[in-house]
Image (cartoon, helix red, strand yellow):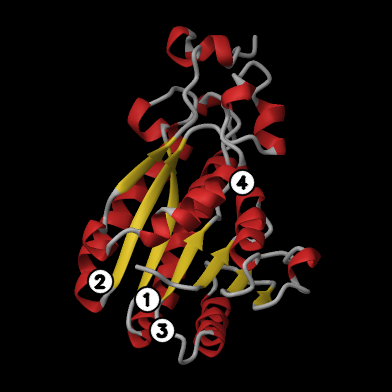
Amino acid sequence: MLTQNVIVLGASSAIGRVLAHRAASSGERRVLAVARSEVPESLAPLRGVTCLSGIDLCSEKSLNTLAATAQTVFQGRGPFAAVHCVGDFWRHAPLTRTPLAESLRVVQSNINTLIGAATALTPVMIAAGGGRFVTFSCNSVRHNFPNMAPFTAAKAAVESFTRSLSNECAPQGVSAFAVALSSVATEKVMRDEPNGDHAHYLTPEVVADFVLAQVLTLPHQATGNVLSLFEASPSFFGTGYFDRHPQPA
């Protein structure tokens, strides 16, 4: 699917911010940058960018605003994509040492927000002649790392939801892909993983370029796939999880 129209959900996140900038850099795309807090000020002056702040993807009122705005921004412009860059990361802590509220927040921020966004935007995509959802998973789903149970469960749900949505909506021209990431060099991750192989972490720029150049151009028939994106690390398979993430006493 080739489209010049993109919604970036979570435009204030590390990946979302870079993705919105990259998407708008050509000046040819229409970009709707959406955030729960404030959309970065640097996006507002860019050509073709519409900013929408204060959107809670778990609130029906906010979702109605999102759907109406998307319909207005992309009116008459054909199919558009929505990239879900929303979701709190985990801090590599044992479940028994983590407050329940924190675990539930991580789950809700990853999967509930995706369900909300898809519920609001799928009808708009169908009316526009088609569209594409891009979601983010994590390689922890495949490797089943310890100390990440709520986060990994949420990302597994993201993958499952993405596959199911792709099958449900393929006849209407709506496709869906998940991108399973290894560690990404954001400020929080670098701080929380002091023993990681930082030289081989992904960067938000690499992730954004992969989405724009690869995922958004895949044929509709490939819908439902989970694409793995990682920077090969010479030490990852030779270093144990607990060496990279020392346990508290």
Write down the residue under mark 4. 205
Q: Are marks 1 and 2 in contact (CB under 8 Å)?
A: yes
Q: Which mark is residue 78?
A: 3
Which badge, 1 or 3, is on the more N-terminal residue? Answer: 3
The picture places residue 225, in percent across and down from the top left corner, at: 28, 50
Element on which disc 1 rests: helix
Residue lying at 53% horizontally and 46% vertically, measured from the top left: 207
Q: Nearer the viewer, residue 20 or 38?
A: 20
The picture places residue 239, in percent across and down from the top left corner, at: 49, 9
- Tell us which disc is closer to us: 1 or 3: 3
- Tell us which disc is closer to us: 3 or 2: 3
- The amino acid on which the numbered mark 3 sits, given as a three-letter code, is Gly
Q: CA distance from mark 4 to mark 2?
A: 30 Å
Element on which disc 4 rests: helix
Q: CA distance from mark 1 to mark 2?
A: 8 Å
Q: Are marks 1 and 4 in contact (CB under 8 Å)?
A: no
Q: Which mark is residue 122?
A: 1
